[in-house]
Amino acid sequence: MSAPREILVGVTGGIAAFKTAALVSDLVQSGVGVTVVMTGGARKFIGEATFRALTGRPVATRSFPRDDHPLGPHIQLARQAELLCIAPTTANFLAKAAHGIADDLLSTLLLSFTGPVILAPAMNKEMWTKPAVQRNVAQLREDGYHFVGPSEGWQSCRERGVGRMAEPAEIAAEVRRLLEQSKPV
């Protein structure tokens, strides 16, 4: 029997973070080992307890934990997983990723991670269409990142438009597709 596939799911601070719980649940139920990494902003939208219950694992939130990761969580977590999925991916996080800014655990982890990365953008329709956001997306595509969405639909700004995070099933399908293409670590 082979070991379960191991992935990281990064959660950034957008209202769509509630949909990430369904994504994580789907992946865990299909036998994927999931460790969740949350930004400070994400914790304002959804609680760590949700992801602890869904994964049966601690949630990583701090760049400098006490003794959990002697080499640093950004290194140890990156080495134990074969795929990183960031859902939702906010405009702020897209900018950090495109410019190599590492000022929290998730952005530092992204720079340490060597496997495939899936980004699931989620933001207001006006934000999504800004030239700066589109330049960041173009740079990240050029850098080899995989994108799922965003979709068109009802947004928390109470309007319809492009910028809504893709549905959890669509993101999970891309995770599975990329895992099938690669060998286990």
Image (cartoon, grey):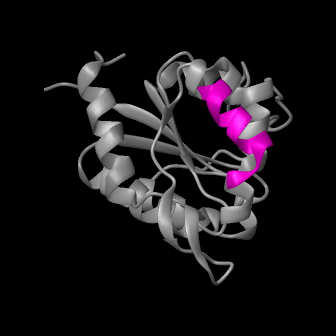
**Residue 21 percent across, percent down from the top left:** 47, 63
From the image, give the main secondary structure of the stretch colored magenta: helix
Task: Pick whichever, 103 or 1, lies toward us.
Answer: 103
Please tell me how many numbered marks the rendered image carries. 0
Determine whether 108 is above or below 126 in the image.
above
> Residue at 43% of width from left, 53% of height from top?
55
> Residue at 64% of width from left, 35% of height from top?
137
Screen quadrant of the N terminus: top left
User: As drawn, is 40 to the left or to the right of 113?
Assistant: right
> Residue at 40% of width from left, 64% of height from top?
22
Determine whether 53 is above or below 7 in the image.
below
Can you tell which quarter of the image residue 67 is in? top right
**Residue 114 percent across, percent down from the top left:** 55, 15
**Residue 115 inside the magenta-drawn segment:** no
**Residue 134 inside the magenta-drawn segment:** yes
**Residue 57 percent across, percent down from the top left:** 50, 49
Q: Is residue 62 visible?
A: no
Task: Pick whichever, 51 or 90, lies toward us.
Answer: 90
User: As drawn, is 96 to the left or to the right of 33?
Assistant: right
Residue range of the region highlighted in magenta in the rendering: 129-140
